[in-house]
Each structure stands twice: as C-alpha cells, then as structure tokens.
Amino acid sequence: MPDPAVPPTPAVPLAALLAREDLALRRIAGPSDPALVIHAAHTSEMSDPYPYLLGGELLLTAGVHIPAAADTGAYFDAYVSRIVAAGGAALGFGLAPVHDTVPPALVAACDRHGLPLLEVPPQTPFTAVARAVWQLLARARLAELRRVSEAQQSLAAAAARPDPVPSVLRQLAQRLGGRATLYGPEGIGIASAGREPDPAVHDALAELTEIVRPSGPGTPTSATHATADTHLAAYALGSGFVLALATPGREPGDHTIASVAAVLLTLLTGEQHSGSGATRTAALVRLLLGGTAEEVAPLLGEGGAWFVVHACPNDLRDRPSPEARGPARPAAGPPDIVATTALGAALGSPLIDPAGDVVQLLVPADREPAPLPGWTLGVSAPVPAEQLPAAAAQAARALARARATRAPLVRHGTRAGLDALVPREDAEAHARALLGPLAEHPALAETLRTWLSLHGSWDRTAVALSVHRNTVRQRIARCARLLDAELDDPDVRMELWFALRQR
C-alpha cells in the first residue's frame, strides 16, 4: 500500500514538541525515531477518526469515546489501526478530566502498530499543544520561504555569470543537496553538477528524462519517481533539452527551486539552440567597431521596424515621491533578472536593458505590446532603426503618462497632428524661439511638458516626476515668469504644447 498523503507543507520534528518544557509532554509508547515529524494538531473524541484526518497529524484525545464495558484490547487495537491507516503521525492522550492514567491496552496497541503515544499532563490544555504546533510550523514555514528566496537569488546570479549553464547547475545541486544534470536533445548528458549517483540511479534518471522529452500532444512537462533513498525528477526545457535531478529527499520548497532553475535553463538553452545569442553578440561588436543602428538592426530580428518599450513594476509605479516618502521608508529596488527575463519573454523579445528602475526593450514591430499584470508600460510608435533614439524618448514620455494616470499601458500617439501642417524646419525654429528662456533649465521644460500633458494636474505631475506637488507649482510659476506667458490661457497652452513636441 502506498504511504498516506500528507499536506505539502514544512513539517516539524515530534522531538521539538517533546522538548517544550512548558507542555511537559512525555512519550510512553511507540517508536522514538528522531526523524518522526508532524504537520498539524487535531482534537477528536470520535471512536473512528479516520474520515477526519488528512495525514501527518498529532491526534489529541481525552478518551471520552472509550466504552465503559467492552473488550478494551480489541477496541484500542481497532482504534489505533485506523489512526495509522489514515496517516496519523502520533497520538496524544490527556489525563484529565476522564482518565487518571493512560489505559495500558492503549499503550500496548500503540507499541504494536508503531504509533508514538504522548501523555498530556492535566495542567496542559489541548489548545496549548495545538498553539505550540502552530508556532513550530510557522517557524518552519518562514525558514523554508527564506531558503527558497535565497536559492532564487543565487540561481539568478548564477545565470548572469559568464558560464551560466554550469553555474546554474552547480547552484541547483548545492541547494538541493543532490545531482543536477542537463540532457541535450539527443538524450546525452551535456553538463552536470553535484554528487555522482549510483549507476542504477543514473540509469533510472536517464529513463525518466525520456518521459518528458517532446514526442507529440499530451507529453508531460515534468515527471518524478522515488527509489528507496533517492527522489528523481525531470523537467522539459524546450528544444529537446531536459533538466534531471537526483536528491536524497523532497522538501516542500524543492519544487519551487527546481522550477526557477528550469525557467532559467530554458532561456539559456533556447538562446544557445537558436543562435540568437551569437547574433546579438555580433550586433554589439559591429556597433562597437563603428557600425550604425540601421546596419546592425537586421542582425537582431526580422523586419526593419521596432517598438521601444519602457517598463516599470507596479510597486515602483505606486511609490511616492522622495519628499512625500520621508527618510524612514526605504525605496523599492529595481526588478531582478528573473522578472526582467520573464517580461522580455512575455513581450516576445530577448533585447532587454534593465536600466535602473526602468526596463528598456526593443520589440519587433510585428509583435504588438499588450498590457501585462504587474507592469506599467510606455510604448513608442513603430520606427526604423535609425529613429530608435527618438522612439526611446517617446516611450519614456508614454511611461511617465502611464505612471501618472495609473494606466497599465500608454502608447505614443500616431494620429496626425497640427505639426503635420507646418514644415519641420519652421516648427523647430518657432519652438527654439518660444522656448528659448527655458533652454538652460531642462528640468523646467520637462515639468512644463508633463504638466501640460496631464491637463494641469499638480498631483499627477508630481507622481510622474517623483517630486512633491509644491515643487511642481514652483517650477510652473517660474516657467510662466521666464516665458512671460499666462498659462491659464488655453491658446497659450496649445502653442507651448506644440513647441514642446518639436524638441
């Protein structure tokens, strides 16, 4: 019979509960294996608790259900066997208020069925035992979350090393305490790290990888198998690559850690398989040697037009300005490599630059960017390679507007405007003359542009520029003085907006 299922949460050793001096629990029957663990505490006075157990519980009872006139030996044998069949981890028997001692027949039954039996003294209520179990479980969950978080960070750092695939495998093997192997499309191990398993385990792992290797519709993306002392797992990475793991056990957070590694290795092996990494390297070298953007762009993808996308996580979008935040509240950090890589995958482009709080991407024009959960996006108009710098400015302005209006995505307007009616040279000359007093004050010009784009809203302009709204008021008042303009006049606003669009 298979072992009863237990909740997929961190467990706590039964010995840790017995070590609590405030509870004064005492083991009086059953095994004393230090590896015994519990997942919960449950109180029941049912004569058959089987239907109410999930597995892994410490079952607490005061013996109210014990019949007064019956064959107690047969009764306790059936009672304990049902607890064991349900996957119960241990039994706690309270000495008050029904019984002064633990029935000897119950002690014998627990010894016979291998169920740990704890004596709960009269001064220890069951709620105190349950609370102690909850505290130990909470501590174990926190430790497991910390372990998973640290593993994710180390895997992300490994993926950024010059030798990313071996580095990720080494970190994964170290974090899981086992063997990590990358199998190529031909079914041959091409890289590995960690302790070398037994030949039988190695063969079983190779067979497991064939289960997840793409062979048609319905092929699973992961598979697991367990031997006497080793847990095996295989994850399909795409393009025929497979990640295989052999570990001495299986902790609740191990699957999350392995999944993060699988995502990173999918990106790394996919890049290697397609050759896109080599073409991007060639594009970089060509630029460094004096090539132009239009000469390099064909190396980066099909087609000649691109969107420039500026993105920031929503927690950074919602962050208050430095003046409003105050010195005691830390600022949020930039997005990590896993988040930015996932963003690029969602938008269909590996051309990513996580420049501080804002992530910059180049997306081919045939892949229209769409809103993404958790991100705020500013998107330029599609442009040829030689106009990418101007498109970057468009994306930056679109992102500022998206942050100010709390919109998930703002696109640069492509509709023909009034500036199409005026020759470009004349429009630029007019803008230089009108905005000349602001030429030496770029912060004022950008504040004026943002303020006009947000219809004169002080609060939304402050959010977009990450300054206090009083700072916005002071800058706009100074702009009015320098330009000698009445900014409440809609005609003046329209003329200034037209001029600012020519910059």
Image (cartoon, grey):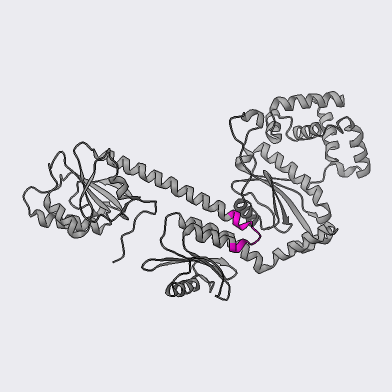
Membership of 145 in magenta stretch: no
Q: Is residue 102 left or right of residue 341?
A: left
Q: Quadrant of the C terminus?
A: top right
Pick whichever, 258 or 404, lies toward us. 258
Which residue lies most toward the front here? 195
| Residue 377, percent from left and from top | 67, 46
State whether the magenta stretch is mostly helix, strand or loop: helix
Q: Residue at x 68, y 52 (%)?
A: 369
**Figure check: 218 above or below 478:** below
Q: Is residue 384 left or right of residue 408?
A: right
Q: Residue at x 84, y 54 (%)?
A: 386
Q: Which residues are magenta?
A: 156-166
| Residue 489, percent from left and from top | 81, 26
Q: Is residue 241 left or right of residue 133?
A: right
Pick whichever, 232 or 487, lies toward us. 232
Q: Is residue 362 visible?
A: yes
Q: Is residue 258 visible?
A: no
Q: Is residue 445 left or right of residue 134?
A: right
Which residue lies most toward the left here? 69
Q: How many marks?
A: 0
Q: Residue at x 47, y 63 (%)?
A: 178
**Figure check: 402 above or below 153:** above
Membership of 159 in magenta stretch: yes
| Residue 476, percent from left and from top | 78, 27
**Figure check: 295 above or below 316:** below
